[in-house]
Image (spheres, rainbow, N blue to C red):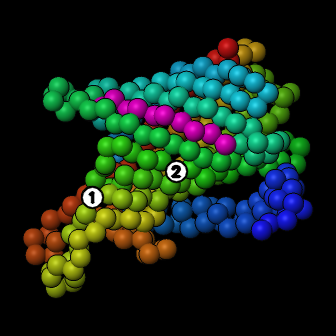
Amino acid sequence: MESPENSDCRNSPNYFSSLAARFGMLPILAVLLIGPSLVFGQAEESDPEMTWATFGINKRISEDWRFSYSQLNSYSITESRLNFVQSNLTFNYRINGRWQAQVSYVPTFSIDDDPQNQLVFHRLRGGIRYYTPLGRYFRMYHALNAEHHFTQRSKFSQRYFYRLNFYYRNRDWPWRLRPFIDQRLFWYQGGRDLQYYDTLGNRTERVPPNGLHAYRLQVGFKIYPAKRFNLTFFFMKQKEFNTSLFGSRDINSINPNSGSLRRSFYDFSVFGVSAAYRI
């Protein structure tokens, strides 16, 4: 049985902080060094481009609880049409000064010219976030998140990602201008079975393409033109990739007998603007 002293220690902020200090550099190095080198080292054709316009509200329920709601409208520049609308309802709990936990419900409404292809995808997301001050003006937080998709996608039904965010905060700047850089590294799990082949074209195994498969880089800035209102402008790039790290399987498969490719990479670029109001 665990002693009361150990239990109190594990519930203290210092215990969480020591864990972050001990293990925090490993995911940071993985994202900053391994992620970009693997992702942007793969030459691809021109990616689809989209614009994302989001408006949201948020409110403090109590000293430690907040909720927020937002709606994202995605317009495909490549296809010149509205391609999906995504809502996000989130509850956020402040554990202490540096740790936060949150849970979200995120339905996505896929919009297609053919009414039969208009689908609704539901997902639940949970995560934990840790904030770290870096001197007087720089801030950083890193987070671990897990998603469950109730509609199985071809590449995953669960998705896990590590997020690393740096931003600069100087309250003397006009409209409290806050530039930032945000990076995310995704692990796919539980997709539909994919047939794999050896170099001779013989079938080897038919299993889900579980593994480390996507990287997102987002750069932008946030401004506060009014006391309770903020705007965010950003550019984001996603790249899917194959790697053997951590036992990952290829996300796509080429049949050497026919040369056909199943499940090509889904890479895209986004020009986005987001508005939020605190009620």
Q: Which span of residues is magenta-colored?
A: 101-110
Asked if residue 109 is among those painted magenta in the image, a careful observer would answer yes
Asked whether 50 or 206 is in front, the reply is: 206
Asked whether 28 or 222 is in front, the reply is: 28
The residue positioned farthest toward the front in the image shown: 1
Instruction: Please give the residue where the numbered disc 2 appears in the rendered image.
Output: 146
- For the C terminus, the image quarter is top right
For the point 60% across and 19% down, the residue is 57
Q: Is residue 169 visible?
A: yes
Asked if residue 82 is among those painted magenta in the image, a careful observer would answer no
Q: Is residue 258 above or below residue 94?
A: below
Direction from residue 139 to residue 49 in the image, left or right: left
Question: x, y (%) of residue 127?
Answer: 60, 46
Tell me the amino acid under the disc marked 1.
Arg
Label 1 element class? loop
Tell me the amino acid under the disc marked 2.
Ala
Q: Is residue 1 above or below residue 62?
A: below
For the point 81% across and 53% down, the residue is 11
Label 2 element class? strand
Question: x, y (%) of residue 206?
Answer: 23, 71
Q: Is residue 166 visible?
A: no
Asked whether 172 or 264 is in front, the reply is: 264
Mark 1 surroundings within 10 Å by alpha-carbon count, few (fewer than 14), some (14 through 19), many (20 or more): some
For the point 75% across and 46% down, the residue is 99
> Looking at the magenta stretch, what is its main secondary structure?
strand
CA–CA distance in space, label 2 to label 1: 19 Å
Quadrant assignment, res 176? top right
Q: Is residue 120 above or below residue 194?
A: above
Instruction: Please give the residue where the numbered disc 1 appears in the rendered image.
Output: 192
For the point 83% across and 42% down, the residue is 97
Q: Earlier in the sequence, mark 2 or mark 1?
A: 2
Direction from residue 91 to residue 262 in the image, left or right: left
